[in-house]
Amino acid sequence: MPSLPVIKQLLREVVSNKDAFRVPEPDLIMENAAQVASFHEAGREDGVMAPVYLFHAAQVCEVVKPGDTVLDLGCGPANQLGLVARLNPDVHFIGVDLSDQMLAMAERNLQAHGITNVTLRHGDITDLNGFDTASADAVMSTVVLHHLPDEAALFKCFAEVQRVLKPGGGLYLVDFGHLKTEAAIRYFAYQYEDRQPALFTVDYLNSLRAAFERDTWSEGWSRYLKDYGGLHSTFVVPYMVAAKSPPRRSLSADMLKRLHAVYQNMPAYHHADFRDLVTFFRLGGLRSPAIL
């Protein structure tokens, strides 16, 4: 059962008139060292983003296979990428990001965890000119696309994903969807302000304001990505939107056990957030591996 405060916010979204419209991020490339550090802190396995990253890791594990080459678009400090790479040591991941500060943090993060199956590249996710056509077995991107300046850039990114992805390849692109009211945006941004760096709270607020509308996602997906899988959003209110290919493998009992161990190691207060995400995406048509 979803938590009562979340249900209250979603009901308000349903009955309220729209008063929030997209505002692009003030900094499209995160180069400020303090911002990078706060983002990294929030993304640690005990950080405020831990349940979200675990949910996405489980989804990605279904669309990658041993021996794959997988692109992660906008890898940031590699908290998410590092988790997925540790779970899939027989997959080669390439993390792409425009921020030198983020890539430096990612390099340190990967080294600290002894992760050797990741290569990092400086690059623009709307112009993957360093990658050949049909050269990637799978493409992933988690909570990054709202950093793009406008719909044209989002569609360029989708077109590049279509170009570099092999026929029948794996796909998992996910990000915030734009909420209808400023009240809901502020609620989710400040929900855990006592548990997260102050800079992260501001970045989170800006991210929710910069999220693309569900209809914009649908238009780009139908133009470029519909042959690779479905488009899903959280039930009733598109707090998150995801394009995902059909699973390319069944997760082994060992993989499910390792995912469950990550869940168990999270602070207890994160468990409700994880279950909420599972529930609302399932009601929106996107099922999760059974890791609880």
Image: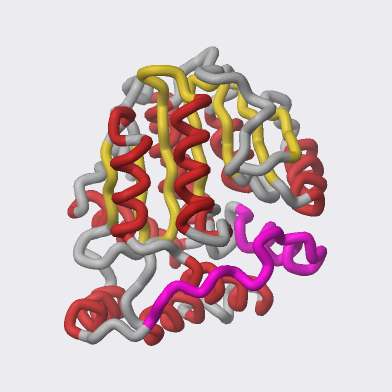
Q: In this figure, which colouring scheme has been used for the structure?
A: secondary structure
Q: Residue at x 36, y 19 (%)?
A: 168
Quadrant housing residue 32? bottom right
Quadrant housing residue 273? bottom left
Q: Residue at x 51, y 43 (%)?
A: 156
- Where are the magenta residues, as a range? 20-44
Q: Is residue 87 above or below residue 250?
A: below
Observer-nearest of 247 and 250: 247
Query: Percent position (x, y) of residue 36?
Result: 74, 61
Query: Percent position (x, y) of residue 61?
Result: 44, 31
Q: Is residue 192 above or below residue 230?
A: below
Which residue reaches farthest front?
Answer: 152
Which residue reaches farthest top?
Answer: 67
Observer-nearest of 195 and 74: 74
Query: Percent position (x, y) of residue 99?
Result: 75, 51
81 lies left or right of 274: right
Q: Is residue 251 magenta-colored?
A: no
Q: Is residue 14 above or below residue 19?
A: above
240 lies left or right of 158: left
Q: Residue at x 32, y 77 (%)?
A: 180
Tell me the quadrant of the picture where the N terminus can be found. bottom left
Q: Is residue 34 magenta-colored?
A: yes
Observer-nearest of 155 and 79: 155
62 lies left or right of 134: left
**Number of numbered markers:** 0
Tell me the quadrant of the picture where the C terminus can be found. top left
* Magenta stretch, main secondary structure class: loop
Query: Percent position (x, y) of residue 121?
Result: 74, 35
Q: Is residue 184 visible?
A: yes
Q: Residue at x 40, y 84 (%)?
A: 182
